Image (tube, grey):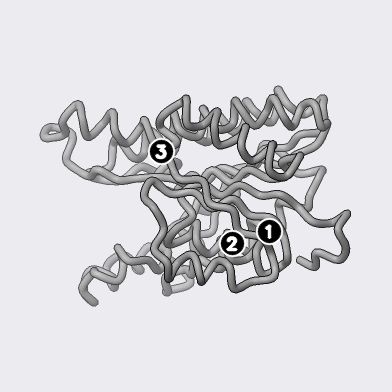
Amino acid sequence: MDSGGIMDKKTVIVTGSTRGIGKAIATSFLKAGHNVVINGRSELSSELLDYFNSFSGTAYVITGDVSDSSFAKQLIKETKKQFKQIDVLVNNAGITRDNLIIRMSDEEFDATLDVNLKGTFYTSREVAKVMLKQRSGHIINLSSVVGTVGNVGQSNYAASKAGVIGLTKSLAKELAPRGVVANAIAPGFIESDMTGKLTDDIKEKALESVPLKRLGEAEEVADLVEFLSSQKYITGQVFHVDGGMVMNG
């Protein structure tokens, strides 16, 4: 995406952007010269700050937990104050607390939904107030293939990510009259710190369900986010970045 001139410069919030897919998304927008709000629950290391500041765009850090509704309000309010408008919200923050259903605790279930679903709701609710007044904006929510097909040991994660899809479709219908669009992206097996710890045997087994026979890259998800952030006539859709795991007719 070419930022061109100041009129094309976007202000983008990426939650959970200190590592993995979120980091790749933030990097993509920073490389293109945009204002990017970096968010994570912990203070950034000096090395990570230097990394984000090495690009042509402006990185602005707001630390906090999106599962806290008061922080979600602060995140949107501070971004609006700093950059005057908000063009794109990418809800990427997410956690896993895997366990079989008969062993899953209330805390494991609640914690996962608090971040993955309620966090997405909180930030979307607050940014919608800004975008509706602007009569423009993009909300891009990260779901998962698990939210569409389920997975053993991830009933909490699947519920949260399926909820994100339902939330996204409702947002799309509610916000469309004012020119605000909302879409979801459902990644499959993506190279990450977590997949890096898997044995070759486990990876090989996982790839049996992937027609392209490889793990995806975080940058491939970021490319789709960047594309969607410039589209005004695509809304209410769920895009799978999964190497063909889920094929909808």
Secondary structure, mark 2, is: helix
Residue 101 at what x, y percent from top left?
18, 34
Callout 2: few (<14), some (14-19), or many (20+) C-alpha neighbours within 10 Å?
A: many
Q: Residue at x 76, y 34 (%)?
A: 180
- Image quadrant where residue 226 sits: bottom right
Q: Nearer the viewer, residue 35 or 151?
A: 35
Residue at the spot 78% in from the left edge and 53% down from the top edge = 230
Nearer the observer: mark 1 or 3; the answer is 3
- Find residue 226 and name its label: 1
- Amino acid of disc 2: Ala
Front-lying residue, 103 or 5: 5
Q: Which residue is mark 2?
A: 222
| Residue 51 location (% of width, % of height) | 51, 71
Q: Which label sits in the foreground, 3 or 2?
A: 3
- Using the image, determine if residue 235 lies above or below residue 203: above
Q: Residues within 10 Å of mark 1 (few under 14, many from 20)?
A: some
> 167 left or right of 147?
right
- Residue at the farthest left position: 103
Residue on which disc 3 sits: 65
Q: Amino acid at mark 1?
A: Glu
- Residue at (11, 35) in percent of width and height: 103
Q: Is residue 199 above or below residue 89?
A: below
Image quadrant of residue 175? top right
Amino acid type for the residue under numbered disc 3: Asp
